[in-house]
Image (cartoon, rainbow, N blue to C red):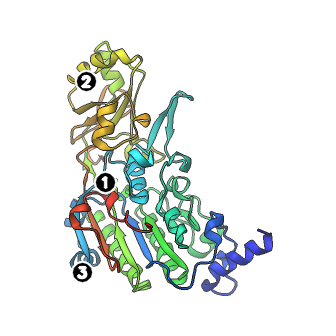
Amino acid sequence: MSTSASRNSRREFFGTIGAGAVLAGLTPNSARARAPAAKTGLPQRCCVVMFDGFGRDYYEKSSMPTLKRWERDGFYKPIRAVMPTVTNTNLSGISCGVHADEHGITGNSYWDADADQEQFMSDGNLLTAATIFQRAGRFGVRSVLVSAKQKTIPLMRQGTWLAVGSQDPPAEIVARYGKAPEIYSPDVNYWVWKVAVDLIRTQPKVGLFFVHTTDYPMHKYAPESVESQVHLKTIDQFLSEAADADPGMAFFVAPDHSLNAKSTVINLKLALERKGVEIQVAMSAERDQYPKHHGGFGGTAFIYLKEPGDADRVVGALRDVSGVEEILTREEAAQKYRLNPYRIGDLWITAAKDVVFGNSKQEREQLAADYRSHGSAHELEIPGFIYRYDGALPPAHTIATNVDLCKFLYQA
C-alpha cells in the first residue's frame, strides 16, 4: 500500500471526529483491519469490558445502578474466573474464548529455560489461539482496544485497528484526550473510559470495543471503603454513558478475578532450603510490570526442580509449610485447570486465602495491614453480564466462567 493510500484509509476511519482532527495520523495495527467494513450485514456492535479485579463482593457492596439495570434487563450470572487468578491468563481466556491449554498464557510470567530467568507473558507471539479481534476481522469487523495496563497492548494488539495503552498512548490520542493519569490511581480508569466512550460515539465503523481497566483501586481499597464506592460509582456512570453513546451496542462485562486481604508472604525457595531441600526456582505466577499493585506476590507459584527425581522430597517438604494449600504435579495441574503443561513448573502450588508467594527477603514476612492481592483459588468468584445482545445466547448453564461469556462472538 502506498503512503498516500495509507493516509486516505486512516483519514476515512477518523473522519467522523471532525475536520482537522488530530487523530488522523494514527496507524492501524494490521493490514487486514485496513479493509473498509461492509455497509450491510455486519454483526451487532459490541463492547467487551474486562473489569480488572471486579469480584462479586465489589459488585454486591456497591451502588451501581447501571449494572443493576443490566442485571435486571439483560443476562446476569455469578460466574468464576480461571486459575491462576491473574490478569494475563484470564484476559487471554476472555479474548480467545478458550482455556490456557489452548491459548497458552499460563500466568503473568513464565520461566524461560533458554534465558534461565523469569519473563513477562506479554508477547502476543506466545498466544496459541486466535483472539476476539482476529475473529472479528474475519467478519470484516474493525476493533479498538483501550487498556489502562500497557502490558495488554503487545499481548492483544494483533488484529486490532487501534490499540491504546494509557502508559504509552499515541501522541494523537494524548492531544485529543489529554495525558493519561498515573497508572497507580483510580483516575486512569476514568481516562480509559473517556477515550472509549468518545470513540464509541464518533467511530460508527468500529464494530468491536474491548475496554480493560486496572485493578489498582481494588488492590488498595476493600469493597466497603469510601474510596472503592466512589471509584465504582464513577465507572458505573461511564458504563451508562457508553450505552447511551450507541443504543444498539451490546455489552459483555467479564472480570478477570476478585481480590482478598493477605497477611503473609512466603518465599518457598527459602522455606525449602531451611528444610534442606533444594530447587531450581520458585516463582509467582502473578509477577508482572506493576509491582506497586502486589509486590510481585500472588497465590499461585510454579516450582522448577533441579532433577525430576526430587519431586517426592520437595512435595513432602511443602506439605509441612503452613500456608500451602494445594500441591500438584505439572500433569495434574494441567489437567485440573486446563493449562499448557509446558508453560508451568514441575510443581504447581496454591496458597491459603490470606497467603501469597513471592521473592520476599525473609522466608515468611507479614504484609501491610491494607495489602490485597489475588492469584489463588480464593479469588475465583466474579459477576458476569451480557446486556442488549441481539443474538441467541447459549444456555445459561454453559456460561460458567469468564472464558464462556463472549466466546460465541464472531464464530463461523
- Residue nearest the viewer, comparing 273 with 343: 343
Q: Secondary structure at mark 2?
A: helix
Residue underneath mark 2: 318
Amino acid type, mark 3: Asp
**In this image, 2 relative to 372: left or right?**
right
Q: CA distance from mark 2 to mark 1?
A: 26 Å
Q: Considering the image in quadrants, where does the C terminus appear?
A: bottom left
In the rendered structure, are the residues bearing label 3 and label 2 in contact, judged by CB atoms less than 8 Å apart?
no
Q: Look at 41% across and 79% down and name the residue there.
A: 242
- The x, y position of residue 122, in whole percent, is 51, 48
The mark nearer the N terminus, 3 or 2, is 3
- The x, y position of residue 159, in whole percent, is 56, 62
Q: Secondary structure at mark 1?
A: loop
Q: Residues within 10 Å of mark 2 (few under 14, many from 20)?
A: many
Q: CA distance from mark 3 to mark 2?
A: 49 Å
Q: Look at 27% across and 36% down and name the residue there.
A: 350
Q: For residue 223, which quarter of the picture?
A: bottom left
- The outermost residue toward the front is 412
In the rendered view, tell whether residue 312 sits above or below residue 267: above
Viewer-nearest of discs 3 and 2? 3
Q: CA distance from mark 1 to mark 3?
A: 24 Å
- Residue nearest the viewer, comparing 312 with 36: 36
The mark nearer the N terminus, 1 or 3, is 3
In the rendered view, tell whether residue 131 sits above or below residue 396: above
Residue underneath mark 3: 73
Amino acid type, mark 1: His
- Residue nearest the viewer, comparing 199 with 368: 199
Residue underneath mark 1: 257
Amino acid type, mark 2: Leu
